[in-house]
Image (cartoon, rainbow, N blue to C red):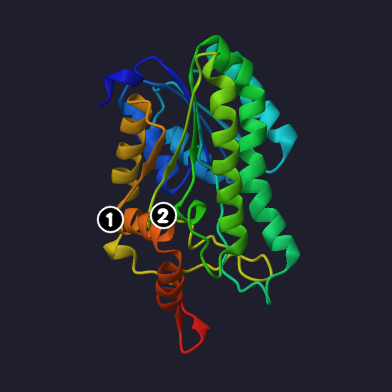
Amino acid sequence: MLPYFKDKVVIVTGGTDGIGKALVEKLLASGAKVATCGRDNDKLYRLQSDYPSFPLHTMIADVSNENDCRRFIETTIKFYGGVDILINNAGISMRALLKDASIDVIRKVMEINFFGAVYCTKYALNSIIERKGTIAGVSSIAGYRGLPGRSGYSASKFALQGWLEAIKPELKQDGVHVMWVCPGFTTSNIRNAALDKDGASQGESPMDENSMMTAEECAHHILKAIQKKKRTLVLTFTGKRTVFMNKFFPGLADKLVRNFFFKNGKLVK
């Protein structure tokens, strides 16, 4: 339970899997009025069925589609009367070398991870300003350090963080808090759903999920950071080490990243 969120209207994009679903569940348990969206009707239906007596508004929406985002935000405001907190969580990854990847794959990742956040934030902004609320973006360590085989994903997260950093001082005088959180490797469906070089879902993860932070623990840290109005949050020891190494020893970081993701010249993670 996090009493800070009681009766607050919180939007979580991409709330049917992984970190997004964990955020929705923890917010509902804390008494928040939650709205979430996703592309899978069955998953949204199951989520709604699991919380039949809770204030939960769901809608099928693809965040890469501006009209979907507009309708989702507008219906949420109509349903609850406004927005206190927007958590731009929806995202997709990719796994392909640049020489093999279709341009369309990189474009799709950018449209979901970056423009999806822009669309939702833009349409929710007036209400958030009115309520002096919070805008949060779920980024990644890949937003600090470009990762091989994930060039489009890294680009989208760099863009997201740069955009949030730019609007943070813009909205300060309006009483709006802007922040971004960067999970390290977390048990999540994002790697299974990651796009391959042709834009199809991988369907499996090349990572050892057992050694990663759980989505539930990650969600708890994110909500605590929102409550404390932190500027940024970097999670896991590996994540913090990566950010530190890339900032102060970038050449060494290049070598370590290469060794981690490649074996015998081939991308293995």
Q: Is residue 155 left or right of residue 175?
A: right
Residue extending farthest left? 1
Q: Is residue 89 left or right of residue 52?
A: right
Badge 2: few (under 14), some or many (20 or more) residues near its Cα, within 10 Å?
Answer: some
Check disc 1 and give the amino acid type.
Answer: Phe
The mark that comes first in sequence, 1 or 2, is 2
Query: Where residue 85 appears, x then y in whole percent?
Result: 48, 23
Residue 62, visible in the rendered structure: no
Q: Which residue is mark 2?
A: 188
Q: Secondary structure at mark 1?
A: helix
Q: Which residue is mark 1?
A: 237
Q: Secondary structure at mark 2?
A: loop
Q: In front: 158, or 187?
A: 158
For the N terminus, the quadrant is top left
What residue is rendered at 58% in x and 42% in y? 162
- Location of residue 28 with respect to 202 vertically, above or below: above
What residue is rendered at 39% in x and 36% in y? 23
In terms of image quadrants, where is residue 104?
Answer: bottom right
- Location of residue 233 with respect to 76 vertically, above or below: below
Q: In front: 144, or 263?
A: 144
In terms of image quadrants, where is residue 103?
Answer: bottom right
